[in-house]
Amino acid sequence: MTNGRRILRAVAMGLACHGTFALAVGSMAWSLLHGLQQGLGRVPGGFGPLANLLLVLQFPLLHSFLLSARGRPWLQRLSPVGHGRTLAPTTYVLLGSLQLLLTFWAWTPSGVVWHEPHGATGTAQYALFVGAWLFLVKALHDAGLGVQSGAVGWWALLRDRPVAYGGMPTAGLFAACRQPIYLGFALVLWTAPVWSLDWLLLTAPWTVYCVVGPRWKEQRWERLFGERFRAYRATVPYLLPRFRR
């Protein structure tokens, strides 16, 4: 393959990944701000909740499967431009973003809204929501934005070098808890200012995923980093932070 074609594929994949990621994050924030009442789904009758539940479940199930031993070969095959091994982190973020877009765009609203923010209390709710997003962004930064955004994949292909995943994150928020990204994701869900039946249907299962899902991630870390991770696990709490001077 010529250098020009490889570079073109790398840039195209980078644009697709980051553009879809930005759209997915914006769609999630917008939907949570409106209690998931803006979805375009129109599943008739009593099948709406069932369709929504399937949307809720597809994200954690596929997201976890693609990182498993069985799922990694599939992840490499799903690269739309080839170079599956190098582009695996980019493909993973692209697919996760598409899953989020599917969830929030295809959602069938129930119309059942329990609470909308007003006055000083509403201002405090919006502030908490923004704070949760900032916490999540900080956690992603501390984990390595290149990996979390998928940039390491297409950048490695662009430079024709192996993917640099970096080491085990232990600084920043990772010094306070082992899974700050999952904690930040759960905080974003629970601080959504509009409470609705749809919001609860989404938030409850995804919170379970935020609590249980990292267990498999930590098994991978133990295989990769061995004694270093076991020492880290012994001193840093799992999900709830412990801040020290």
Image (cartoon, rainbow, N blue to C red):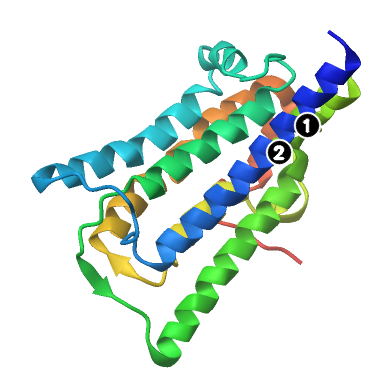
List x then y, in percent, for residue 159: 90, 25
- Classify residue 43 by image quadrant: top left
Q: How many C-alpha atoms fall within 10 Å of the one at disc 2: few (<14), some, or many (≥20)? A: some
Q: How many C-alpha atoms fall within 10 Å of the one at disc 1: few (<14), some, or many (≥20)? A: some
55 or 70, nearer to the observer: 55
- Residue in view at x 41 percent, y 87 percent: 121
Relative to 183, 109 lies left or right: left
Q: Which residue is mark 1?
A: 11
Q: Which residue is mark 2?
A: 15
124 or 33, nearer to the observer: 33
Looking at the rendered structure, the secondary structure element under dot 1 is: helix
Relative to 6, 222 lies left or right: left
- Classify residue 134 by image quadrant: bottom right
Query: What's the amino acid at mark 1?
Result: Val
List x then y, in percent, for residue 63: 49, 31
Point out the residue furthest to the left here: 45
